[in-house]
Image (cartoon, grey):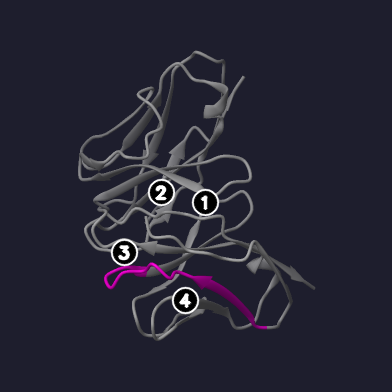
Amino acid sequence: DAKTTQPNSMESNEEEPVHLPCNHSTISGTDYIHWYRQLPSQGPEYVIHGLTSNVNNRMASLAIAEDRKSSTLILHRATLRDAAVYYCILRLYNQGGKLIFGQGTELSVKP
Amino acid sequence: GAGVSQSPSNKVTEKGKDVELRCDPISGHTALYWYRQRLGQGLEFLIYFQGNSAPDKSGLPSDRFSAERTGESVSTLTIQRTQQEDSAVYLCASSVTGTSSYNEQFFGPGTRLTVL
């Protein structure tokens, strides 16, 4: 299975931007990059996804490197509610869309 | 409409007993997934349904685990002869379809299973 590598943990201050990196050097041309997050005691929730171009939505932005071997999830202004584990996942084109979760990055936000 | 629901929210059982966990996906979602999350760990994929068929059961850890889906709706995950290592949160997710790699998955709140 295609793998992603993320830092185990990151810290941010409230109201500041956060850049969460992800390496996926074995990505293939048809794999989508998905980000999910899991708040404490909840199921994961979808954040954003992309294929080649940078993407923006109401929650975050996704910056994808030109060679697609890395990506960065950007939270523009962190809030306390953004404290969660963030998972970067390659969604494989030919495997029914199952998500292969790594360990993720635990983001803590300081007031 | 309603999101993904799961029942029970908590289940405590004794080692060796069978348990059934239920998932009600979002109406109209043809794809349904089961995952397991042990304490402090990431999610592990268990099984994927497209309609009532399960084209990918590769994550089921042993033959004590089975799942079915009926009416392209509700799914049941059954664990026979439970062991202590089965203790985990079992999460269900659904998406519009599994045949596209960009559809997001919507997760339920999970069932916390504790095997004594």
Q: Chain of mark 3?
A: B
Q: Identify the residue under disc 3.
A: B103
Question: What separation in Å lies between label 2 and label 4 (alpha carbons)?
Answer: 32 Å
Q: Are marks 2 and 1 in contact (CB under 8 Å)?
A: yes
Give how far across and how far down residue A50 sits, in percent: 37, 76
Query: What's the mark number on residue B4?
Result: 2
Amino acid bearing label 1: Gly
Q: Amino acid at mark 2?
A: Val
Amino acid type assigned to the residue bearing label 4 in the image: Ser
Q: Which mark is residue A43?
A: 1
Chain for numbered disc 1? A
Decide if residue A107 is on the left or right side of residue A58. right
Q: Are marks 2 and 1 on the same chain?
A: no
Q: Quadrant of the N terminus of chain B?
A: bottom left
The C terminus of chain B lies in which quarter of the figure? top right
Q: Which residues are magenta?
A: A17-32
Between the C-alphas of marks 4 and 1, the distance is 25 Å
Examine the image and state in which quarter residue B112 appears. top right
The answer to which quarter of the image holds residue B70 is: top left
Q: Callout 4: residue from which chain?
A: A
**Residue B34 shown left or right of residue A111 in the figure:** left
Residue at the location (43% across, 70% down)?
A: A25
From mark 2 to mark 3, how far is it between C-alphas?
Answer: 15 Å
Q: Is residue B28 magenta?
A: no
Residue for badge 4: A70
Question: Mark 2 or mark 4: which is in front?
Answer: 4
- Cα–Cα span, label 3 and label 4: 21 Å
Q: Does residue B78 sit above or below A17 in this rendering?
A: above
The spot of residue B22 in percent (x, y) is: 40, 34
Secondary structure beneath disc 3?
Answer: loop
